[in-house]
Image (spheres, rainbow, N blue to C red):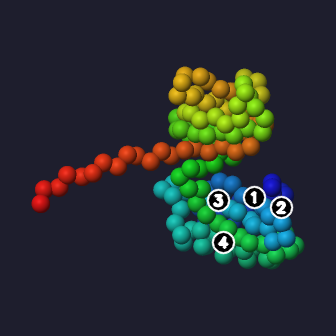
Amino acid sequence: MKLDSRLQEIVEKVAAREGLELVHAELSGGRRPTLKVLIDKPGGVTLDDCATVSEKLGLTLDVEDVIPHQYMLEVASPGLDRGLYREADYERFAGLPSHVRTVEPIAGQRNFHGRLVGLDRTGEIAAIIDEPTGVRHLIPLTLITKAWVEIEPQQIHPVDRDE
């Protein structure tokens, strides 16, 4: 669920004060919703970064009373398979393997795997995905329900050791 503007503003300010980038924030759930906040910085976030943002954000939200009922607060790193949420993310992570899921089929499919090329801005803004087969897809951002970069694990080769 998209955050209301006041809640979004508070989350962004707390992250920025700690020198962190707010990657994404969402409020989801029923009777006791969860506010999930993803933060990042060059070199990655630490457990201390997450704890600091959690503590300061929790205190600020309690004082501001923006969420009028009980909620859970989760602050984390975006992880290796980082979600693509903003237009800037599609440009920043161009060249990486990605997965895009759409709300309705495009050319008969709803799941797209391939190299993220970036954005096409000639008409409706669309993500450009090149499949390994050579097929290029333009996927309007308005149709994307979920998108993320896929960090492929490197093959691990046994190490020869002389004993």
Q: Badge 4: how crowded within 10 Å, few (<14), some, or many (20+)?
A: some
Q: Earlier in the sequence, mark 4 or mark 1?
A: 1
Q: Type of residue at label 1? A: Glu
| Residue of label 4 | 54
Q: Earlier in the sequence, mark 3 or mark 4?
A: 3
Residue at (70% x, 45% y) in the render:
146
| Residue of label 2 | 6
Residue at (53% x, 62% y) in the render:
45
Q: Between marks 2 and 4, how big is the CA–CA gap?
A: 18 Å
Q: Is residue 91 left or right of residue 126?
A: left
Q: Earlier in the sequence, mark 2 or mark 3?
A: 2
Q: Position of residue 140 (x, y in %)?
A: 74, 32
Q: Between marks 2 and 1, how big is the CA–CA gap?
A: 13 Å
Q: Quadrant of the N terminus?
A: bottom right
Q: Between marks 2 and 3, how big is the CA–CA gap?
A: 18 Å
Res. 38 mark: 3
Q: Is residue 73 left or right of residue 6?
A: left
Q: Between marks 3 and 4, how big is the CA–CA gap?
A: 11 Å
Q: Between marks 4 and 1, how big is the CA–CA gap?
A: 14 Å
Q: Mark 2 vs mark 3: give the one in front.
A: 3
| Residue of label 1 | 26
Residue 124 placement: quadrant: top right
Q: Type of residue at label 2? A: Arg
Res. 122 mark: none
